[in-house]
Image (cartoon, rainbow, N blue to C red):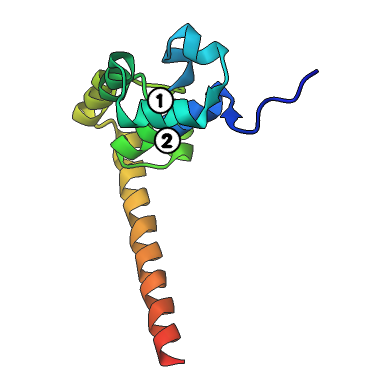
Amino acid sequence: MSRPNAQSMKPATAAKKLDVYLPATPAEFQENPITRGELAALQADPPQWLKDLRKNGPHPKNLVAAKLGISIAALARGGVGNALTTEQINALLEENPPWLATEREGYQEVLREQRRLKSLHAEQARGN
């Protein structure tokens, strides 16, 4: 078994770096290692398939959670699958089911607490 080139990455890694859902990418992307140069080219001048995926999805869990304003764990608690399209995300936001409203509220509280602690630590660092 040959060792993959250190300058290439698995398609899953490249998909993460591009913020796209791997199963929605073209077969050629999924089946071949991607070099750092190819990744840079995709980022600099995205092909139409990449533009479409970024705009319409399906989006990976981390982006779905961010667009909904909740954590990835909250997606699982809400019974949301791995990937949603932009249309599905917008429909969820419009519907705002009770679980989503509760999770969004809780997530905002967590973020407020993180900001408070960061500020407190910064003040303590300046004081010492």
Where disc 1 sits, the SS reads loop
Q: Which is nearer the eye, 73 or 78?
A: 73
Name the kind of residue labelled 1 in the image. Val
Amino acid tagged 2: Asn
Look at 80% across and 18% down and name the residue there.
1
Outermost top residue: 27
Expressed as whole percent of the image width and height from the top left, the position of residue 3 reads: 74, 25
In depth, the one of 80 and 123 nearer the eye is: 123
Q: Residue at x 49, y 9 (%)?
A: 28
Q: Position of residue 84 (x, y in %)?
A: 36, 21
Q: Is residue 12 visible?
A: yes
Q: Is residue 28 left or right of residue 19?
A: right
Please give the residue where the numbered disc 1 appears in the rendered image: 20
Residue 19 appears in the rendering: no
Label 2: element kind: helix
For image coordinates 31% across by 23% down, the residue present is 46
Q: Residue furthest bottom?
A: 128
Measured in 3D between alpha carbons, the distance from the residue under mark 2 to the one under mark 1, in whole angstroms, is 10 Å
Badge 2 or badge 1: first in the primary sequence: 1
Total numbered badges shown on the rendered structure: 2
Tell me the quarter of the picture where residue 25 sits.
top left
Q: Quadrant of residue 95?
A: top left
Closer-to-camera residue (37/75) = 37
Residue 94's disc is none
| Residue named by callout 2 | 62
Q: Position of residue 72 (x, y in %)?
A: 45, 38
